[in-house]
Image (cartoon, helix red, strand yellow):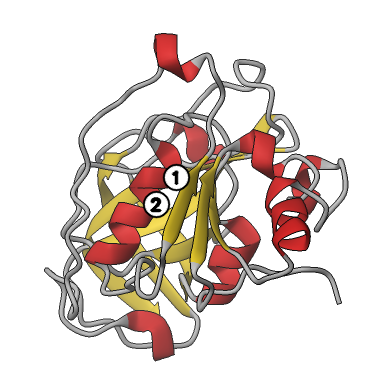
Amino acid sequence: MPWRPDPAAEVLVLGDSFANIYSLEEMNWGRAAGMVEQLSLALNRPVDAILRNDNGAHASRETLSRELVRGKDRLAGKKVVVWQFAARELAVGDWKLLDMAFRPSGSGESGSPTQMRELIVSGTIAAKSAAPRAGQIPYAHHVFTLDLIDLQVHQGTLTQSKIAVYLFSMRNHQNTVAFSWPVGKRVKLRLRPWRPDFFARYGRINRTETNDTELTHPWWGEVVE
């Protein structure tokens, strides 16, 4: 079986695309053979990892921060944290301060969607995170975030009045239809919980977030035609 990070490991690596390049299959350079895998082999012990393409000065830290806020203690049992980033970040990186407080029960919303099945909802875009235009970044894919309000559920059950949704703004170097959606637009999406399997599949792609950290249980979204 290909190597996988171990959440119970005593070593945690935070990294960017230089750790992903021979590990994240979507980058088309191979899989399970990157920096973290080599470190695990050299140490002869399991290693945990939080990796995210681009913005090495804050992206992996931001993911760690949001995991802690959502009640997932990714620092539990850790003895060493290794933080890898490109040297250029020392000159041009965004070294913003991030909250690393662990909140055992999460915050904000009531009712985690992790046990829910697929939903289809309509909602109004209250906020959207920044997203690059195709050709502006060297990566083939990008994930951005939409905050939705005024929700109407067409399939399934939803108790939240406002939700955060991750979806592709760019795939295979082409912007998606969602990329051009303006704030205030009414949209229809198929939603699935941002479970560990989705995190493992899409969590390492470069991603932008909105400023609403109270939306602790995001969804993965796909456009309903």
| Residue 196 shown left or right of residue 154 in the figure | right
Residue at 30% of width from left, 57% of height from top?
Answer: 66
Q: Report which quarter residue 73 is drawn in.
A: bottom left
Residue at 32% of width from left, 87% of height from top?
Answer: 157
Up-down: is 24 above or below 46? above
The residue that disc 2 covers is: 63
Q: Report which quarter residue 40 is drawn in.
A: bottom right
Q: Nearer the viewer, residue 155 or 215?
A: 215
Crowding around mark 2 (Cα neighbors within 10 Å: few <14, some 14 to 19, many 20+) is some
CA gap, disc 2 and disc 1: 5 Å
Residue at 53% of width from left, 31% of height from top?
Answer: 85
Residue at 50% of width from left, 35% of height from top?
Answer: 179
Up-down: is 33 above or below 209? below
Question: At numbered mark 2, what does the secondary structure look like: helix, strand or loop?
Answer: helix
Q: Nearer the viewer, residue 104 or 179?
A: 104
Q: Amino acid at mark 1?
A: Ser
Q: Report which quarter residue 112 is drawn in.
A: bottom left
Q: Position of residue 150 (x, y in %)?
A: 19, 61
What is the quadrant of the N terminus in the image? bottom right
Q: Amino acid at mark 2?
A: Thr
Badge 2 vs badge 1, beta-carbon distance below 8 Å: yes
Up-down: is 193 above or below 35? below
Q: Position of residue 24 (x, y in %)?
A: 73, 50
| Residue 33 shown left or right of residue 59 in the figure | right
The residue that disc 1 covers is: 60
Q: Position of residue 131 (x, y in %)?
A: 46, 30
| Residue 18 shown left or right of residue 184 in the figure | right
Crowding around mark 1 (Cα neighbors within 10 Å: few <14, some 14 to 19, many 20+) is many
The single residue placed furthest to the left in the displayed view is 108
